[in-house]
Image (cartoon, rainbow, N blue to C red):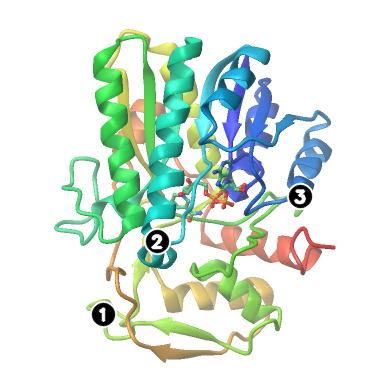
């Protein structure tokens, strides 16, 4: 059973490779390495004692994808490849529609041409937009507030239509909340080539002295300490959710063939709580200053995880201290990420 992992060299994809290799699957990673490096996959092999096949192909290249699906006799696809920065998507919307929407369209077209019908798609809690009620469950209305979120929602809608057209399809769209942390070995972690805008890499850069301080965007939200609250999930828990979804799709061939699940912990932490937790884990002081709210940010977002727990028999096991400890371990062992 060979699984194609698009974007498998990236932050979440590389952790997914470890979990799926450990579960006994053979893997072929499809990546352009535009926001990742081959070093992550070398380290995946070091952790697992087994390597993945690597194909440098763009997800918009349907012919290339068909060649790989056939050559490796793939039976399923986990699709991480994409662009993911909310702010950048406001400036470069066409790039986001091209890679995220056209890329998934070409991937699904290649899968159909090759008779591969099992797909797990990386969606995002961004599809919800401003919460009307909390915790956010999968039936909450969708109203994304950025081009990035809209690309995810368009793809989800396309996948529902595709699944409805042919019962052979087995599709799961997983809505991630806020992935953080790293593999406990400290060999793989988040090492973006783009300038990070998400909280945890910026906390790390501040704790390790690469930035003098960090900006807390919005200190006047209607929350206990005025800062935004998010549902942070350990990346290893997140990818274990993918394995559970993959097993579920295989085990329930007669059930609904397009499923949507939140992957979060159900717990919300504020920006200041995250800073304090990281200070404890790193034994460093993290300087910060207040800044204006960022457009597109909501005050509070956390998941109702009941559907994933009941259906996939999956629950996030790692708490805030493990998230911060494993992140700091990765940063200490790799102060410049995968760059030498
Ligand atoms: N990290 C998060 O906070 C988060 C939250 C919600 C959803 N997601 C989604 O999860 C997925 C993975 O996120 P990540 O954090 O691992 O990002 P990442 O940037 O680390 O990984 C994405 C990978 O896709 C590759 N890629 C980009 N464009 C490509 C293309 N056209 N063809 C082939 N490969 C390409 C990149 O080189 C990289 O290896 C993305 O789809 C993202 O939108 C991430």
* Image position, residue 42 (x, y; %): 81, 41
User: Toward the viewer: 172 or 227?
Assistant: 172
Q: Secondary structure at mark 2?
A: helix
The CA distance from mark 1 to mark 3 is 37 Å
The CA distance from mark 2 to mark 3 is 33 Å
Residue 60: give its label: none
Circle 3: is it few (<14), some (14-19), or many (20+) Cα within 10 Å? Answer: few
Q: Residue at x 34, y 36 (%)?
A: 261
Q: Secondary structure at mark 3?
A: loop
Q: Residue at x 50, y 33 (%)?
A: 242
Q: Is residue 161 above or below residue 307?
A: above
Callout 2–callout 3 Cβ contact below 8 Å:
no
Q: Is residue 266 visible?
A: yes
- Indicate which label's residue lies in the foreground, 1 or 2: 2
* Image position, residue 161 (x, y; %): 24, 25
Residue annotated with mark 2: 89
User: Toward the viewer: 110 or 40?
Assistant: 110
| Rendered-image quadrant of the N terminus | top right
Residue annotated with mark 1: 221
Residue annotated with mark 3: 185
Which image quadrant is residue 315 in? top left
For marks 1 and 2, the one nearer the N-term is 2
Callout 1–callout 3 Cβ contact below 8 Å:
no
- Indicate which label's residue lies in the foreground, 2 or 3: 2
Q: Residue at x 67, y 52 (%)?
A: 36
Q: Give the side of residue 159 with respect to residue 283, left or right.
A: left
Q: Is residue 192 above or below residue 113?
A: below
User: Toward the viewer: 339 or 17?
Assistant: 339
Q: Residue at x 44, y 65 (%)?
A: 88
For marks 2 and 3, the one nearer the N-term is 2
Q: Secondary structure at mark 1?
A: loop
For marks 1 and 3, the one nearer the N-term is 3
């Amino acid at each position: 059973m060979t699984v194609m992992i698009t974007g498998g060299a990236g932050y979440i994809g590389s952790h997914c490779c470890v979990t799926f290799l450990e579960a006994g699957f053979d893997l072929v990673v499809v990546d352009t390495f535009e926001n990742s490096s081959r070093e992550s996959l070398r380290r995946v092999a070091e952790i697992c004692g087994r390597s993945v096949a690597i194909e440098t192909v763009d997800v918009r290249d349907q012919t290339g994808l068909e060649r790989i699906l056939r050559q490796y006799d793939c039976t399923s696809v986990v699709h991480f490849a994409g662009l993911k920065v909310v702010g950048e998507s406001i400036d470069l919307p066409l790039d986001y529609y091209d890679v995220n929407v056209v890329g998934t369209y070409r991937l699904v077209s290649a899968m159909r041409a090759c008779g591969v019908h099992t797909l797990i798609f990386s969606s995002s809690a961004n599809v919800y937009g401003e919460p009307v009620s909390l915790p956010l469950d999968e039936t909450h209305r969708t109203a994304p507030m950025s081009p990035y979120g809209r690309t995810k929602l368009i793809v989800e809608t396309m996948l529902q239509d595709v699944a409805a057209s042919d019962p052979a399809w087995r599709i799961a769209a997983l809505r991630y909340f806020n992935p953080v942390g790293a593999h406990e070995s400290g060999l793989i972690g988040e090492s973006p080539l783009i300038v990070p805008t998400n909280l945890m890499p910026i906390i790390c850069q501040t704790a390790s002295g690469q930035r003098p301080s960090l900006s807390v965007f919005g200190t006047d939200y209607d929350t206990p300490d005025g800062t935004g609250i998010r549902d942070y999930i350990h990346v290893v828990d997140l990818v274990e959710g993918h394995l559970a979804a993959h097993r579920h799709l295989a085990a329930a061939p007669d059930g609904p063939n397009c499923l949507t699940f939140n992957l979060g912990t159900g717990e919300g932490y504020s920006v200041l709580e995250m800073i304090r937790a990281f200070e404890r884990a790193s034994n460093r002081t993290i300087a910060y200053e207040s800044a204006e709210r960022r457009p597109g940010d909501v005050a509070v977002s956390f998941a109702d995880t009941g559907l994933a727990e009941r259906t996939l028999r999956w629950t996030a096991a790692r708490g805030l201290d493990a998230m911060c400890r494993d992140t700091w371990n990765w940063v200490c062992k790799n102060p410049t990420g995968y760059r030498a």
